[in-house]
Image (cartoon, rainbow, N blue to C red):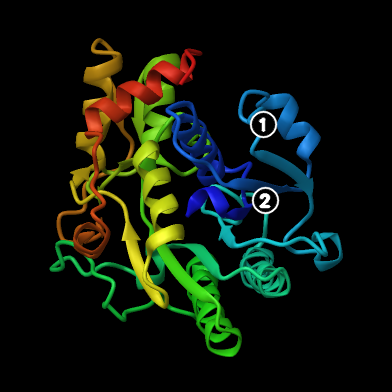
Amino acid sequence: MIENAHILLTGGTGFFGKALLRYWAQQAHKGEPMARVTLLSRDPRRFAQHYPRLVSPPWLQLIQGDICDVNSLPKGNTYTHVLHAAADSTAGRNLTPQERFDQIVCGTRNILELAVSSGARRFLLTSSGGVYGAQSPDIERITEDCHTLPDPLDPANAYSVAKRMAEHLCALYAQSHGLEIVVARCFAFVGPDLPRDVHFAIGNFIRDALHADAITVQGDGSPLRSYLDQRDLAHWLATLLMCGLSGEAYNVGSEHAVSILELAHTVRDLIAPNKPVCVMGDSVLTSPRNRYIPCTKKAQNGLGLRATVGLEDAIRFAARTYQGDSP
């Protein structure tokens, strides 16, 4: 039962972590039983100063530590569950490919060791849909039993290859230590905590709609993506942590495909109808359309998970929060 659980959360100050903290706070506000949550952060004081409401619940404790520095990690504590959400795709903007690879692989191994030493019985890894490599244009939605992979000889694939290796580490620790491991292969998301100044098109479009003279599409707008609201993301991750089948991977995302150009126009129509959409790249008609769309039937059929928030409502919610309203 969740009320008897003690969860160690890594990456709690990132996009996934903040989404989870908001979700758990909402559940507690509705009277749902809550686990104890210990949040690992390199700078707990700074996080508390920036997000005082997120760190106020009585069931939450912040501790200092770095997943890449084994000597900084807590010792002697007991946890029942570990949710390893550190090193998601919003992080590592200033890291070299080698540093990013080491952060993901070595950090995961350190947290797996901590899980074993602390007596944890379950471990959820937030992985990525990038572990499949480029999605074939003839595959509408990619499934968990697809065994394609990113090119390991391309340094640009350091993040995706490292996530695949982190998954394999989880399998090895499950075999060696009896740890129940579950993998969440995460795709694309939208919500108030998504950064607006990195490589996420939807966050950048919402930023432009609110603050720029035009909404800028950096490419030709042809790639296909799908977006799950961060409230659904948090519910899915919390469910996978508690109920996902051990030794299994689950796609986490939306099945509703939209082109980047269509997305830009949708954001414009919802937030800033009078602003232009500027497309910076020329359309390449001979190239296959870039797709990044998951099949989520495994999570739907096995765990009853659904995308409950439509794309337009998710965009409106994110925009309201970006403008300063309380989420």
Q: Position of residue 308 (x, y in %)?
A: 24, 38
Observer-nearest of 95 and 295: 295
Residue type at mark 1 is Val
Image quadrant assignment for residue 216: top left
Q: Position of residue 64 (x, y in %)?
A: 80, 48
Q: Position of residue 156 (x, y in %)?
A: 51, 66
Pointer 2 residue: 94
Q: Are marks 2 and 1 in contact (CB under 8 Å)?
A: no
Look at the numbered disc 1 and give the secondary structure of its residue.
Answer: loop
Left or right: residue 125 versus residue 50 is left
Left or right: residue 59 versus residue 295 is right
Residue occupying the point 25% across, 49% down: 254
Looking at the image, residue 67 lies above or below residue 43: below
- Residues at marks 2 and 1, CA–CA distance in whole angstroms: 27 Å
Looking at the image, residue 155 lies above or below residue 47: below
Q: Which residue lies furthest to the top in this view?
A: 274
Residue type at mark 2 is Asn
Q: Which of marks 2 and 1 is in front?
A: 1
First of labels 2, 1 by sequence position: 1
Observer-nearest of 155 and 68: 68
Image quadrant assignment for residue 275: top left
For residue 212, say whether it is visible: no
What is the number of the mark on residue 191?
none
Q: Where is residue 253 in the image (x, y as percent from the top left)?
A: 31, 51
